[in-house]
Image (cartoon, grey):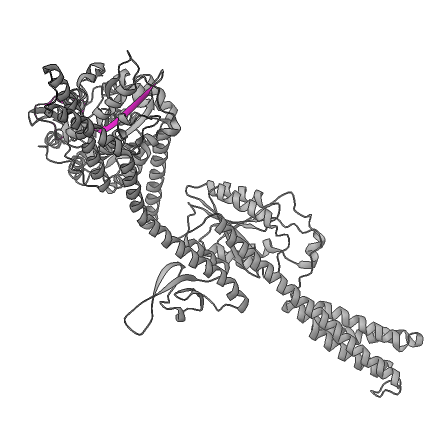
Amino acid sequence: MSRSGRGHLRIYLGAAPGVGKTYKMLGEGRRRHARGTDVVVGLVETHGRRYTEEMLGTMETVPRRILDHRGASFTEMDLDAVLARRPEVALIDEMAHTNVPGSRNEKRWQDIEELLNAGIDVISTLNIQHLESINDVVEKITGVPQQETVPDRVVRAADQIELVDMTPEALRRRMAHGNVYAADKVDAALGNYFRVGNLSALRELALLWLADRVDAGLQQYRAQHDIDSTWDTRERVVVALTGGPEGETLIRRAARIAARSAGGDVLAVHVARSDGLTGANPTKLAEQRNLVEKIGGTYHQVVGDDIPAALLTFARAENATQLVLGGSRRSRLGSLFTGPGIGATTIRDSGDIDVHIVTHSQMGRGRLPRQRGALSRRRKIQGFVLSVVLPPLLALLLGLGGDTLNLTSNVLAFLFAVVVVALVGGMWPAMVTAIGGSLVLNYFFTPPTRTFTIAEVNNALALAIFVMVAAMVSSVVDRAARRTRQAARAAAESETLATLAGSVLRGETALPALLERVREAFGMTGACLMERVDDDELTEVWRPLASAGTLTCTRPEEADAEIPARDDLVLVLQGHQLEADERRLVGAFAAHAAALVDRARLSEAAAEAKPLAEADKLRTALLRAVGHDLRSPLASAKASVTSLRSDDVEWSESERAELLETADESLDRLSRLVDNLLDLSRLQAGVLPVFPRPMALDEILPGVLSELGDDADQVTVDVPDTLPLVEADPALLERVVANLLANAIRYSPPGRAPLITGSALGDTVEVRVVDRGPGIPRADRDRVFAPFQRLGDTDNTVGVGLGLALARGLAEAMHGTLQPEDTPGGGLTMVVAIPTAPADVPVPGSRERSEQGDSGIGG
């Protein structure tokens, strides 16, 4: 530690409260203290945990500062005292804590920054849910908003971050043993925030965030030490698939290679050759694609005649570090005919990409390679060489036979040579052989020999027929080669279209992903879908809707290829010119891209129309539901008032009182109904005024019981007065609890009074309204919160079904939640979770919060 410079910050990071961060921090402090380091405890929250208190040992503790705020006393870390004491190391717990008003800084992490700037080393603790960047993610997982956060830049600037890890099961056992919470809070905590799923998700967030932090540190180290060579800390593994039986083995091997480093990716690629691909099984490819997606990889398809080149081009474009190939299925005899295989060629040209040749059960079991239909340049050269060599060689061999062979036999021998050359090199080498062979036959074997004169007509006819037969044979062979090439190309196109159709059937709607497929399949550097927009000028204006790869053109005519999708949409490609048959294939992708654009716009229109439809549905339900519920209290009140005003009947005092009471009750029902309707409409319009303030939960109980009237005698209240303050609108919270209690009273059996209780959990206070009624099946629990739903009711006199819908809406308006649970032993429990108030804004005259910091829970 440099006393003259900035101090060093060490953070113990945990996935959840209770994993042992404070214990670890104190253990590090004791080790340094034992080595003679000047260590003081700036602030530690033990939360009454015996083992944590014992870890304080003999280390010096700086007394806390007492602050008065709005009539209440609070304690905070005395920053000035720690700065004046100027230790080498300060232990400061709960980095995300909000200081009490009157402190120098608003947040504790700002206090820590001052100490670091003064040259004091700081050791602190932090839970992953308090990081600013993932605060919203944690709220989605746990349902609990985190009000105290620390900027990521502050945590990333720490010199050391150590993860304090514990499995969810182990943490729950700690809680069950009373090592985290008091016994009366354990059950509620285990059933809510500390569920196994929540803890597992928080643990994964902590591990992933720390892995990214380690990777950033590694890159910083490389930059500081001018290290330019590649350090393959994150693998991108490309696995080549042919549709053969070895595909699953290759995919799993690639997944294991990628799993050896954090963040490894698996990319499966299938090369569809324009000259046909031996052994490509569409069914197998589909199965292997599903396997790739199950392991979290991606599937790609490209078209290429040179498979090794296509694989390496794809791998380099994707910045791959590893390439996995299967061992050749060809037999040794097959290798003699075809020379070096794909694996050997790929290894030779791979450069800095590692190539893995994976053995499998099908190695060496292939048959002789089937002859390709398309004639390569190499085969044509071989054909021309044979056309020059075979005629003189055959003449020499036939000349050794002397007079034993006649002209017919010699012509058939040369015709055989023409067929051989045609099979090897095609039409033109065979024609050269035929012409050369006819000249040799005429000169050496047709009387008179040694001249080009033909004496007999039948010999001339034989030579003419020989040339024609040779020409026809070579033409048939060449045509078969072209047809085979076309068929193979069509097969490759159909395979690509089948992949496109499969993406449609699977519901893939991402336009950039489709353009990336086009770019990969046709070896382009960039692909873009452009739309023509109306402009006042004469020139056309185009705007890109989506793109993939690198594209420099801004108009369709500037690209290498433009494929119209419809009048106002064009798919443009950059990289090279397309052949005619390729343009037809790209046209199918363009049509699908246009369909995706239309589908997206229809979805947007449907989304815009959905609120209108919901509003219309609400109005319809309202008209259907409130007809009776408005008429009933109106009719009852009117009948009572009309009776009282009537001169035909002499009413006694008791009768008059009864009629007035009936009118009063009916008007109260009508008033509550109108209030609920107005509040629900304001909620749905987003204009309901909410005025939250710190308040004690017991403030609303008198108003709730008063609103219930005589039914209040049926309610059992068990709300501890030691609960933390909550941040809520008192009037709205009173409405929520009153609605829930009225619902509980309605369904509670005689002699089984509903119960209202409260407990603290994390950064929330939970209000539980418990009844012993029939309960609600799990499948119907979401329905009961919809407006105008009276699940299981047939009697309209109980209301229009707004109570629970309004209660949930009001709770969410206060940033809380309302969820139903089963009551142990039968019944329904409604749980209202309201966030606790910040420690810096207590209610004047209210009780002091019994705990501060991280809601009474910490490392």
Toward which corner of the image does residue 6 lie, by quadrant?
top left
Q: Quadrant where the C terminus lies?
A: top left
Q: Verify whether residue 773 appears in magenta.
A: no
Residue 23, image x and y in percent? 28, 24
The residue sitting at 85% across, 80% down in the picture is 462
The vertical placement of 202 against 287, above or below, is: above
Q: Which of 31 and 568 lies nearest the eye of the viewer? A: 568
The single residue placed furthest to the top in the displayed view is 751
Residue 333, percent from left and from top: 72, 54
User: Which region of the structure is painted magenta?
Assistant: 827-851
Residue ranking furthest to the right: 404
Q: How many marks?
A: 0
Give percent across and percent down for residue 401. Answer: 90, 73
Give the left or right position of residue 247, taking residue 649 as reference.
right
| Front position in the image: 86 or 829 | 829
**Which of these two is toward me, 95 or 700?**
700
Q: Is residue 834 magenta?
A: yes
Report if residue 39 is visible in the image. Answer: no
Q: Considering the image in quadrants, where does the N terminus appear? A: top left
Measured as percent of width and height from the top left, residue 535 is found at 29, 69
Q: Is residue 795 among what the camera can see?
A: yes
Which of the 4 image quadrants contains residue 679?
top left
Identify the main secondary structure in magenta. Answer: loop
Residue drawn at x 17%, y 26% as measured from the top left: 639
Q: Is residue 736 left or right of residue 422?
A: left
Q: Nearer the viewer, residue 800 or 415?
A: 800
Residue 480 quadrant? bottom right
